[in-house]
Amino acid sequence: MKVLLIGGTGLISTGIVHALHARGAALTVYNRGLTERRIGAVAQLTGDRNDFAAFERTIAAAGTWDVVIDMICFRPDQAESAVRAFAGRCGHFIFCSTVCTYGNTQTVVPTLETTPLAPHSAYGRDKAACEERFRRAHAERQLAVTIFRPSHTYGPGGNVINNVGWEPTFVDRLRQGRPIIVSGDGHGLWQSAYAEDVGLGFAHAAGRTRCFGETYNIVGDEVVTWDDYTRRTAAAIGAPPPRIVHLPSDFLLAVDRPRYAALEEIFRFHGVYSSAKLKRDVPEYRPAMPYEEGVRRTVAWMDQHQKIVSADRDPMEDRLVAAWEKFAGETVRAFGAQ
Ligand SMILES: NC(=O)c1ccc[n+]([C@@H]2O[C@H](COP(=O)([O-])OP(=O)(O)OC[C@H]3O[C@@H](n4cnc5c(N)ncnc54)[C@H](OP(=O)(O)O)[C@@H]3O)[C@@H](O)[C@H]2O)c1
């Protein structure tokens, strides 16, 4: 099986490369050659997919593929270029979308693929528009398309998120035992997947006719509360039990909406999705990495690559916690509570 990955050296795509290797596929990756390679000796096409003319020329000259997996298509103009590049040149086209296409209006968990899309952010709206473009290419028989919607995916090459976003100080705050903000009452539900596990799903869908024309959520099996997530992350990396401080999402957004925008996009809601359809059609997809081991590997990679930012560089969380505790203490006293 001859496979081309657009991207190929990223967080999820590295896992796909490893799983396709294990399947014995003949692989080529297309990227700019800027991101560190963790994929060994894999054939490379070098270029920027945003230079559409050059990208489409390179693809036209490179021949045909059994499968193309596009990991870095975020906008409709990129999707349009991908259709021009690959129509008639590949047997199966896999587009990496996101669960952010669902938005945050779901009232039932887990979210199924049949849930209407109501994206909240520009990211989600653009991914939904790309999906639409690829679905049309499928209907018009230009490409045989499969759409994957990953949820939160982590692993070496990426970072460790926290409940209020992608704070690069999170790991250091845990290590130092500084207070950790969790929105709401900490009971919001969350689901994380390990990148190498997600890679298995993509790799075993590749070339499978049953997956043509289908859309799949691809998520981890475990569902945890954000409080659990925070405690388990701390324990996994040998940090002290975290002092979790619950703050209302509305309060955080009123203080600094841009900084806490991720709460509105997803983190203040339940982020729980079903992979049952994928497991039916691609039974090789069986998430295997225990969270604790996955997070240890991720943090080891972050340490090696100096990706962990000192908590001293960002006093915001400490200031917010102090302000909240002062306000809460005064309010409790004013109401005469014990
Ligand atoms: N991680 C998550 O939680 C999550 C959740 C939902 C969906 N997703 C989706 O997962 C996909 C990301 O996949 P990933 O994790 O493998 O990617 P990634 O870690 O973001 O890595 C990006 C890859 O694309 C290449 N690249 C970036 N810009 C390029 C350009 N202009 N032209 C050519 N190559 C370029 C990079 O190599 P060079 O730098 O060398 O070019 C690298 O190989 C996205 O579609 C995202 O929406 C991720």
Image (cartoon, grey):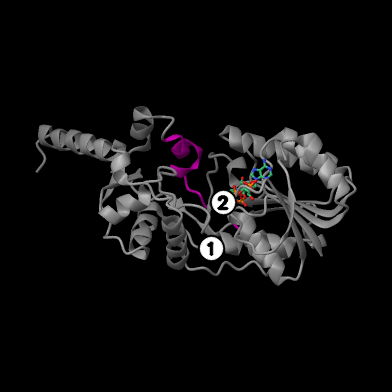
Q: At label 2, which amino acid type do we have?
A: Ser
Tag of residue 221: 1
Determine whether 227 is above or below 324 in the image.
Answer: below
Q: Secondary structure at mark 1?
A: loop
Residue 322 percent coordinates (x, y): 21, 38
Q: Secondary structure at mark 2?
A: loop
Q: Mark 2: give few (<14), some (14-19) or many (20+) Cα within 10 Å.
A: many
Residue 9 percent coordinates (x, y): 63, 54
Closest to the observer, 314 or 44: 44
Q: At label 1, which amino acid type do we have?
A: Asp
Indicate which disc, 2 or 1, sits on the residue closer to the N terminus: 2
Residue at 39%, 56% (x, y): give it.
229
What's drawn in magenta, residue-wise?
A: 260-275
Residue at 67%, 45% (x, y): give it.
32
Quadrant position of the N terminus in the picture: bottom right
Q: Mark 1: give few (<14), some (14-19) or many (20+) Cα within 10 Å.
A: some
Residue 201 percent coordinates (x, y): 66, 62
Quadrant position of the C terminus in the picture: top left
In-image side of 148 versus 1 (left or right): left
